[in-house]
């Protein structure tokens, strides 16, 4: 379903077609997508990026649409048919501080801090971090009227938008039922 169809269906389910609801639909969709991005982790959201290593760099930026890590590895070179792979082990930021104070034990560690990945020990240039991650659901609006979620799982959007309309209209019990249905 596209933006207009989803909005029309949600308004019909909520039995609300007033100007206040219409003026806030895009806000409702933003709130629904925020909840979806916290809860949903599917194969359709999976993406891969290769980040070239920089000599002695410990921090690398995350993709702007990052919603969670699936896997990360160090390739000894940028991707080719033949390359060596080193798996990275997750450490909490606190554990990373401890690891940095200890002698290197042969394991490559990573953690996520803010919008960056911290890697220890720092690597030489010429390799690449292969990051497999969950992408945020692309924003839906009147200009970008479809995304993979609206096409494959329109019920999630309709239920979420309807929940937001019900909460906006102070129908909290109905809003909770619609959010439960979305989940």
Image (cartoon, rainbow, N blue to C red):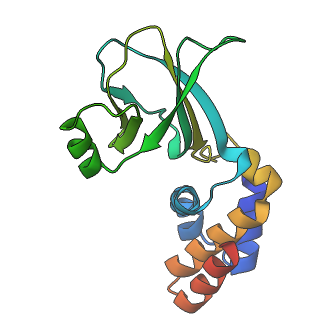
Going 73% across and 46% down the picture, which residue do you hit? 44
Residue 182 position, x and y percent, is: 67, 72
Give the left or right position of residue 95, taking residue 41 as reference.
left
Give the left or right position of residue 29, taking residue 170 as reference.
right
Give the left or right position of residue 59, taking residue 64 as reference.
left
Going 18% across and 38% down the picture, which residue do you hit? 101
Going 60% across and 63% down the picture, which residue do you hit? 22
Residue 145 position, x and y percent, is: 71, 44
Q: Residue furthest bottom?
A: 173
Residue 83 position, x and y percent, is: 63, 14
Q: Quick one: 181 or 21, which is closer to the camera?
A: 181
Q: Quick one: 178 or 92, which is closer to the camera?
A: 92
Assign the N terminus to one quadrant of the image: bottom right
Q: Quick one: 55 or 151, which is closer to the camera?
A: 55
User: What is the number of callouts on the image?
Assistant: 0
35 lies above or below 172: above
Q: Quadrant of residue 156?
A: bottom right
Going 57% across and 63% down the picture, which residue do you hit? 39
Assign the C terminus to one quadrant of the image: bottom right
Q: Quadrant of residue 180?
A: bottom right
Q: Is residue 63 visible?
A: yes
Residue 141 position, x and y percent, is: 63, 47
Q: Is residue 146 visible?
A: no
Q: Residue furthest top?
A: 126
Q: Quadrant of residue 100?
A: top left
183 lies above or below 141: below
């Amino acid at each position: 379903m596209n933006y207009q169809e989803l909005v029309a269906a949600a308004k019909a389910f909520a039995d609300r077609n007033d100007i206040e609801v219409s003026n806030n639909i895009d806000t409702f969709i933003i709130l629904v997508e925020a909840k979806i991005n916290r809860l949903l982790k599917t194969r359709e959201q999976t993406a891969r990026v290769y980040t070239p290593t920089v000599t002695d760099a410990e921090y690398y930026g995350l993709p702007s649409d990052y919603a969670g890590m699936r896997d990360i590895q160090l390739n000894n070179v940028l991707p080719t048919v033949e390359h060596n792979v080193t798996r990275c082990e997750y450490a909490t930021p606190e554990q990373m501080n401890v690891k940095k104070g200890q002698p290197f034990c042969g394991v490559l560690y990573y953690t996520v801090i803010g919008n960056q990945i911290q890697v220890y020990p720092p690597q030489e240039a010429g390799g690449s971090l292969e990051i497999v991650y969950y992408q945020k659901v692309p924003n839906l609006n009147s200009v970008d009227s479809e995304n993979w979620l609206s096409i494959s799982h329109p019920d999630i959007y309709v239920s979420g938008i309807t929940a937001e309309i019900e909460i906006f209209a102070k129908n909290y019990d109905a809003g909770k039922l619609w959010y439960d249905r979305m989940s």
